[in-house]
Image (spheres, rainbow, N blue to C red):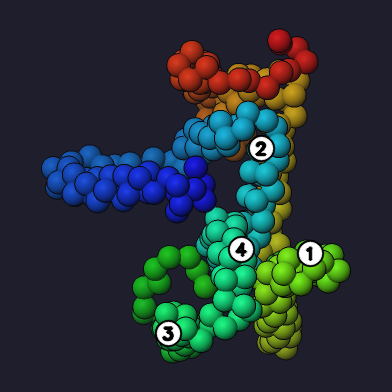
Amino acid sequence: PGPQMLTTKLHITFSMMWTLAIANVVGALLLMVLANQVARVAFIRGHLIVPAVCMFVFMGSWLAGNQMGDWVVLLSFGVIGYLMKQGGIPRPPLVLGFILGPIMENALFITDNAYNGLSWLLRPMSLGILVMVVLTIFFAVNSARRRKLTPGDIQLGEPTRADPTISLSMGLAFLAVLLSALAPTISWPGDVGNIPMLTIAPAIALALLVIFQSWRAIGRARDDGGDTFPQRGELGSAAHFIAWLLGVVAVTYIAGQLVALPLFMALYLLVWGRCKWWFALAYGVAGWAFLYVMFDQIIAVMWHPSLLFF
């Protein structure tokens, strides 16, 4: 349901919350009994999991609208998310913006008309929320400044080292998108254009901050004799893999998903995983059988029309 999970589909949201709570309890009990067996999963080669994961990701996206545009959006945001990760730019705010943006825009429009401008900001509830937001930002920034890992510390989560060149490029790209979105709102009526402006203005300021910090990081790396583009080699491998995913889209136009996805799974294991041909073939056949039984016979998904098969 997307954003509706916070409005008319709240029962789904609460069902998911209770499901997660119960699943955590059941999972903890099962892990106490099956800990040794589950630990063996960590020793499975990653190349054996990637093809199956890609199949589920592609088909999950396809089920959203049964159109090739969903795959284009999937790959586009996959590239954007990967570049943001390599540049050290957080991705959750971008995702939350797409989910909560329409809700906040509608609520702000109603509030602006109901309270005659920005007078609602002086109400006790609004001031309380504003104080909590300011305190949250203050403590987060203060904690980030004081957190300095020593060689003996254990770092949890993603590495903090970011590529300043990628960060600078993403900041410039975001700034260009924001400016192009801001330009048409200038000629809009006040009650319509104010809301996009209130959203875009702080986003532009943050994009400029990212650009400034990235430029300084590049300068420091150059002065220290370091590499200003440390992820150059990894980007080449990532571009190679993205080309393979684009190949899935191209083969889908020619022969359909029932050929493109199993073919990708088998070829990936042969080329990237360096598996034996009979194992890659068996993997691809198993993938085709799963696609046919689950998505064609049970779900009865509408496949994309191909040039070879109708």
Q: Secondary structure at mark 4?
A: helix
- Between disc 1 and disc 4, whose residue precedes? 4
Question: Which sits earlier in the primary sequence, circle 3 or circle 1?
Answer: 3
Of labels 1 and 2, the one closer to you: 1
- N-term mark: 2 or 4: 2
Gap in angstroms between the C-alphas marked 1 and 2 = 24 Å
Badge 4: residue crowd in 10 Å (few <14, some 14–19, many ≥20): some
State the residue position of label 4.
105
Q: Which residue is mark 3?
A: 124
Q: Amino acid at mark 1?
A: Ala
Q: Which residue is mark 2?
A: 71
Kindly indicate the quadrant of the structure image that contains residue 212.
bottom right
Q: Is residue 107 above or below residue 7?
A: below
Residue at 49% from the left image edge and 42% from the top image edge: 1
Earlier residue among tags 3 and 2: 2
Within 10 Å of disc 1 (Cα), the crowding (few <14, some 14-19, many 20+) is some
Q: Nearer the viewer, residue 157 or 208?
A: 208
Q: Quadrant of the C terminus?
A: top right
Residue with the mark numbered 1: 181
Identify the secondary structure beneath mark 2.
helix
First reached walking from the N terminus: tag 1 or tag 2: 2
Rendered residue at 78%/15% (across/down): 307
Cα–Cα gap, marks 3 and 2: 46 Å
Q: Are marks 1 and 4 in contact (CB under 8 Å)?
A: no
